[in-house]
Image (cartoon, grey):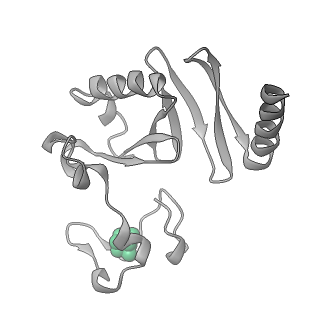
Amino acid sequence: MAIEALAKPASTWCAHCKPGRGCAIYDRRPAECAAFACLWLVNDLVDERWKPNRSKLVLTTSEDGLEIRCDPGSPNAWRREPYASEIRAWAEEGERNDMTVVVIVGQRVILITPEHEFDLGIVGPDERIVRELEGAKVVGATVMKVGEFDAWSKIGKAGSTG
Ligand code: SF4
């Protein structure tokens, strides 16, 4: 993940990370590092199988739903069981509740729905995923720059209320 205080972009090693040992500046790590907790740590429903060093997956929530970050060194870890079935079940629940489930492998983002995988390629921090819906069902997905997205959302709102 990106760490703003260290100007560390996503998908790059942190200069303070010592593989096999941990954080070299743990006692004085940035506040955003100290505040971070993945779902495996804080949600009892996410069991031991999801422990990141075992699953090669890190679960977090976003404003839009659930993000599953997959170790780029094991890019297909999310396709293994029991993970694939559970991710699909979350996608079904997400579609019912208007929430997204995305798998992130390095910088590549894949939107998972009950029936499809939408491989969106690299989605930058200045971009947003836009879903095409038929009722609650996601039938398409694309990526827009934040500015375009904001303008598009306003038009959408005006259309629906006007
Ligand atoms: S916890 Fe330490 S190693 Fe991890 S990103 Fe923060 S500073 Fe880097």
Q: Is residue 65 left or right of residue 156?
A: left
Q: Position of residue 71 (x, y in %)?
A: 35, 47
User: Quick check: can you spot residue 15?
Assistant: no
**Which corner quadrant of the image does residue 159 belong to?**
top right
Name the spot of residue 81 as percent of width and height, x first.
Answer: 22, 26
Q: Residue at x 67, y 46 (%)?
A: 127
Q: Is residue 59 above or below residue 89?
A: below
Q: Please state the total of marks drawn on the protein image.
A: 0
Q: Is residue 64 left or right of residue 49?
A: right
153 lies above or below 140: below
Is residue 122 left or right of 99 when viewed as pictured?
right
Query: Is there any visible trace of residue 79 in the rendered image?
Result: yes
Q: From the top left corner, tell me how far across and down residue 91 is, in percent.
A: 41, 26
Q: Quadrant of the N terminus?
A: bottom left
Residue with the most extreme front position = 161
| Quarter of the figure that contains the C terminus | top right
What residue sits 21% from the left and 27% below the top? 82
In the picture as drawn, the residue positioned furthest to the bottom comes out as: 28
User: In the rendered view, would you say 89 is above or below 155?
Assistant: above
The one nearer the camera, 24 or 135, is 135
**Residue 122 falls in image quadrant:** top right
Percent across and percent down for residue 126 are: 68, 52
The quarter of the image that holds ligand 1 is: bottom left
Residue extending farthest to the left is 48
Q: Nearer the viewer, residue 129 or 76?
A: 129
Q: Please name whichever residue, 36 or 53, is drawn nearer the observer in this view of the structure.
A: 36
Q: Which residue is drawn at the image coordinates 26% and 28% (left, top)?
A: 80
In depth, the one of 60 and 142 nearer the eye is 60
